[in-house]
Image (tube, rainbow, N blue to C red):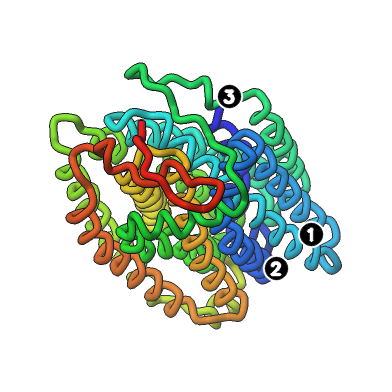
Amino acid sequence: MLGFVCFMCPGMFNALSGLGGGGQVDAQTASNANSALYSTFAFFSFFAGSINNTLGPRNTLMIGTVGYALFVGSFLAENIHPTTAGPFVVTAGAILGICAAFLWTAQGSLVLSYPTEAEKGKYIGVFWAIFNLGGVVGAAVSLGQNFNSEVMGNGTYIGFLILTLIGVAIPRLMADPKKMIRTDGTKVETYRHPSWKAEIYRLWFALRTDPAILMLFPMFYASNYFYTWQFNDYNQALFDIRARSLNNFVYWLSQIVGSLAIGTLVLDQVRFPRRTRAFAGWTILLAMVFIVNAWGYSYQKTYTRESVALLTRKMDIHDPGYVGHVWLMIFCGLLDAMWQTTAYWLMGAMSNDPSKLAVFTGFYKSIQSAGAAGVWRADAVGIPYMNIFLSSWCLTAGGLAFALPMIYIRVKNHTELEEETSASVAETGEAKIGTGV
C-alpha cells in the first residue's frame, strides 16, 4: 500500500520531471518551480520526523499526497495558459515541497521499521520497484499520447492528475502500524505522542547519540542533485518529445531493476555478514558513478546551452547515435535506484527504532532537497551544462568517500538492543535510553 501511494503521487511527479521541463518546451518555469519545491522541502524535512511522530504515519502520508495533485494541476494550467500560469506553477512547487517532506518522512519511517534486519534491503527494493513503476506507467502514458506529437497535450496532464488524486485516498485504507507484526513475530514499536518540545529535542538528541549520521550527509546531498543534468540538461536539451518520452520510460523501468538487484542480490545476501554486504554495495556504487559519468562526459563535451539554442531539430528515436544515448539514460536510472536504496539501507543498518528512523529520513530528505534546490536554481539562471555535470560527478564521488568511514565505524553485523539510544524522550525533553525492538 505504501508503494502504491508513491506509485500514484511521487511516481507521476517523476514521470513529469523526467521529460525535462515538466514536458514543456521552455524548461525555465519548471526549474524555478523545482527550486522552490526543494527549498521548502529542505526546510520542512528537518521537522517532518517530529510531525510524523505526533500525527502518525497515515495522517502524515495523506497530507503529503495533496501537494502532488496540486503540482500536476499547475502544469495543466501552464499548458492551457502558457503566458500567465507561471507564478501558479512556482507557488504549487513551494507547497509541494512542504507536502513532500511529510510524505517521504512517513514513508522512510515505515519502510525501515516494518522489516526485520535480514529483510530491510528486500523491503526497500520492493518499495522502490512499486514506486518507480509509477514513473514507468506515467512515462508510458506520455509516450503513447505524444508519439506522433511535437508538444505535450492536455490529456497527458489530465491522466497524471487523476492518478495523483487516487493516491490521496490510499493512506486511509492502510493498516494501523500499531497492529503490524514482523515476520519474526515481533511487534513494530508503537508511535509515541510526546510534547512538541520533546519532539524538537529529539532532532538534537539523534545527532548527539549517533553522530555517524553526519558522515552520510554528503551522500544525501548528492542523491537528487544529478536529476537536473539528467532531465533538463541532457534529456530536454538534446531530444524531441517522442525521444524524451521513450528515454523517460526506460529510465524509470531501469530503476525497478536497479533497486531490486542491489536490495535483494547484494544488501540482503544472507550468505555474507552485513558489514561485507555494506562494503560490497559501496563498491558497486563507486563503479557505477565513474561508468555513468565518464559516459555522460563523452556526450556533454559535444554541446553547450548556446549550441542547443541554435538547434532547429532535436534528436529523434530514429536518428543515428540515439541507441547509445538511450543506454546512458538506462544506466543513469540504474545508478539512481542503487544510490537511493543503499542510502536507505545504511540508515536502516544504524537503528531499528521507528522514531529515530523518522528523524534520520527527515535529515536525508532535507539535505537531499537542499542540494536539489541549489542546482535547479543554477539551471534556471543558465549556468553552463558542463559546470552542472562536473559538480554532479564530484558530489557523487565525494559522497561515497565520506560514507566509507561511516560504514567501517558504524555498520555492524547486528543492531544490538542496548545500542538503540533514541527510543524515549520525556515530556520534559530529557532523553532515556530505549530498549529498541
The mark that comes first in sequence, 2 or 3, is 2
**Amino acid on which disc 1 is placed:** Glu
The mark that comes first in sequence, 1 or 3, is 1
**Above or below, 299 relative to 249:** below
> Disc 1 vs disc 3: Cβ atoms closer than 8 Å?
no
Residue at 42% over, 23% down:
187
Disc 3 target residue: 176
Quarter-of-image position of residue 236: bottom right
Identify the disc placed on residue 29. Answer: 2
**Amino acid on which disc 2 is placed:** Thr
> Disc 2 vs disc 1: Cβ atoms closer than 8 Å?
yes
| Residue 320: x %, y % from top left | 42, 59
Q: Which residue is situated farthest in the top direction here?
A: 185
Real-space Cα separation, disc 2 to disc 3, in angstroms? 40 Å
Real-space Cα separation, disc 1 to disc 3, in angstroms? 39 Å
The answer to whether residue 385 is left or right of residue 261 is right
Residue at 22% over, 59% down:
404
Nearer mark to the viewer, of 1 and 3: 3
**Above or below, 2 relative to 410:** above
In the image, 199 versus 312, the foreground residue is 199
Disc 1 target residue: 78
Residue at 19% over, 30% down:
270
Q: Secondary structure at mark 3?
A: loop
Q: Residues within 10 Å of mark 3 (few under 14, many from 20)?
A: few
Q: Residues within 10 Å of mark 2 (few under 14, many from 20)?
A: many
